[in-house]
Amino acid sequence: VLGQEQQLFEVQASDCCGNGCTNCILDNKPRPSKRVLLAGKRNIILTYTKFRLIGKETHRSDDQVLLLHFGAADAPEDTVLDVPPGHHVMLRVGSLLRPYSPYWSDFQRREFRILVKLQPEGPMSLHLAALQPSDLLEFRGPIGNYTNDPSLTKCLFIVAQGVAIAPTLPLIRSVLENEEDMSRIWHLVCARDLEHVYFRQELLEFAQNWNYRSCLYLPHQQCDSPACQGAGHCGPECQDLKRRLRYKEVAKVARLDATELASHVNSTIPGQRVLIVAGDAAFQKMMKEAAFHSLAVDPANVYLL
């Protein structure tokens, strides 16, 4: 199986989408995973494979955000679908190439789900918006460079911007669902306002674990009170925002910066500090620079999704 997978995954210059991705397919050629090798199977997505659209939903608070569910159209019995946490898959439609990060996948059923933010007049967005159930699309992967070592105790600072929260969910699950992993997670979520915090219910479920903490950064949160309307955003003592927060939810009407990052550091908690940032290129650069000063994290332990 090892030899077969290495032969299957041949990468050409034309496989690059040209968008300047942090984890370019040309630099992050996937290796056969131990999970697939132990199963004695073949990873079905190593070459471009047709997946059928099983489900399509519009996010309740943003009609420009889609939740898409795909399953392998033709799945031989000797195959599985292995997309490690934090990795993405490449979608090909004609000459168009775009990477997307699954927030859920099923190894045996060969299914995955992605969160998509539609861009006005974007060629791929126009195609995805027109998708109908049972339509076929081609995907290839997985592409990425982060692997979690459960034997190593870490302080994981996971920063997510908007819809880029999606690839952070499997990363968090991989820690919380492993009883041998003693790592602690600080999940710092940046969104426009509370309505645009995607997967909010899942974050609340994560919060039931002893080693997970989160903080929502909502710089454009605004209620209907005269004071908040006058200021252009809610204040720190806004009662409307406090009423809308649920048990164990922490939110700040502010942007995440170096000072805020530093506020989450607890020097008494052991573990190697690791920073994982999911967002656009400008956001990644800003968070990476801020973390060097605020978290004193080793550059080798910074991962950009």
Image: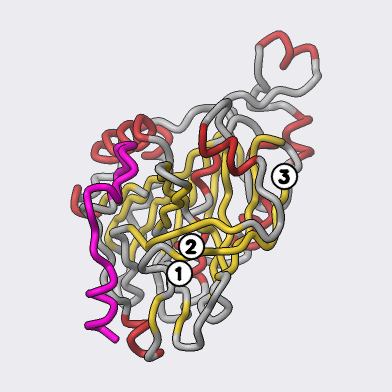
Q: Amino acid at mark 3?
A: Thr
| Residue range corresponding to the magenta coloring | 1-24
Q: Please indicate whether residue 195 sits to the left or right of residue 184 in the image.
A: right
* Magenta segment includes 100: no
Q: Secondary structure beneath disc 2? A: helix
Q: Residue at x 47, y 44 (%)?
A: 160
Please tell me the numbered disc located at residue 58. Answer: 3
Q: Nearer the viewer, residue 304 or 39?
A: 39
The picture quadrant where one finds residue 287 is top left
Residue 141: x %, y % from top left: 38, 62
Q: Which residue is identified by label 2?
A: 172
- For the residue pair 112 and 242, the one nearer the viewer reads as 112
Q: Is residue 263 above or below residue 172?
A: above
Q: Amino acid at mark 1?
A: Val
Q: SS for tag 3?
A: strand
Dot placed on the residue nearer the N-terminal end, 3 or 2 = 3
Q: Nearer the viewer, residue 124 or 150?
A: 124
| Secondary element at tag 1 | helix
Q: Which is more N-terminal, label 1 or label 3?
A: 3
Q: Which residue is mark 1?
A: 175
User: How far across and down, in percent of the image, does residue 142 sit?
Assistant: 37, 63
Picture coordinates of residue 221, whole percent (x, y) = 66, 26
- Spatial CA distance of label 3 from label 2 is 24 Å
- The nearer-to-camera label among 3 and 1 is 3
